[in-house]
Amino acid sequence: MKNARRLGIRAARWVGVLALATAAGCATVQTTGSGTVGVDRKQFIAASVPAEQLQQAANQQYGEMIAQARAAGALDKDSTQVQRVRTITNRLIAQVGAFRPDASGWPWEIHVISADDVNAWCMPGGKMAIYTGLIDRIKPTDDELAAVLGHEMAHALREHSREQISQQMATQVGLSVLSAVTGVQGVGDLGAALTNVMFTLPNSRTHEAEADLIGVELAARAGYDPRAAVTLWQKMAALGGSSAPPEFLSTHPSPATRSAELQRNAEKVMPLYEAARR
């Protein structure tokens, strides 16, 4: 009974996504090659969210953030640390062509920002940052650091930010049409809840899973042990302790689910790692 209900909900959800995506002028695209890990989900991308404009906006925002960090004396303070991060990142960048050849020509850039946040990110087009909080608290090996950076690069390669913006636009268009047809007003709160349940949670989990898989393969191709992704996320989970939310309420997979998937796919790309190490 529960399985049938879940299937019905999923079917209704995807019918809604298709209808809303069509209303917003979205096209079905495959932003990357599937790679050895097999990331082959079709994505809905709105033509009204051009990649070039999104990258320009990202570049501008990145420049402002880097300038702020520099002014605060928090940018690239430890030259040894920065060199380590950039060496690993450059090896990963050399492998992005396995998923999309055009990304080899992106203006990739990474900085280390002194902050307590356990975080790293990559903007559309390849502008990256990692915080010292992650390095100091997780104490990653080079293999684990490659897993972090590869994961963040994967979000950019798959254009997850552009896809999320497209989905939000589709939701707004769909709600506007619904309001016009039914005469219902004041649906802002309902629309926010609907967006959270139908779009944000499932797609965020999907994006995380895809970034995990692509990141594992990038690391393996660059000569970093892909199995380190498992120990990395175990360390991440340990920081959360018992306060971590249940999987069905989280935008991230549970630690157990994530570890199992990473382990399975790390084994799949081990031949790539072994070949890179020869």
Image: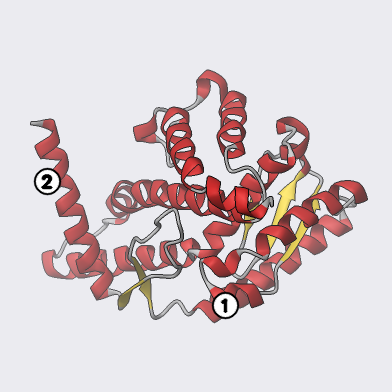
* Comparing labels 2 and 1, the label whose residue is closer to the camera: 1
Is 253 left or right of 25, judged from the image as shown? Answer: right
Dot 2 alpha-carbon crowd within 10 angstroms: few under 14, some 14 to 19, many 20 or more? few
225, 33: nearer the viewer:
225
User: Residue, x 54% and y 49% (percent of image)?
Assistant: 271
204, 42: nearer the viewer:
42
User: Residue, x 24% and y 67% (percent of image)?
Assistant: 20
Dot 1 alpha-carbon crowd within 10 angstroms: few under 14, some 14 to 19, many 20 or more? few
Q: Position of residue 32 (x, y in %)?
A: 46, 68
**In the image, residue 43 above or below residue 189:** below
Mark 2 and mark 1: Cα distance apart in space: 39 Å
**In the image, residue 225 above or below residue 234:** below
Which mark, residue 102?
Answer: 1
User: Residue, x 57% and y 70% (percent of image)?
Assistant: 97
Place residue 89 in its image quadrant. bottom right
**In the image, residue 55 above or below residue 178:** below
Which mark, residue 8?
Answer: 2
104, 172: nearer the viewer:
104
Q: How many marks?
A: 2
User: Residue, x 59% and y 73% (percent of image)?
Assistant: 103
**In the image, residue 245 above or below residue 196:** above
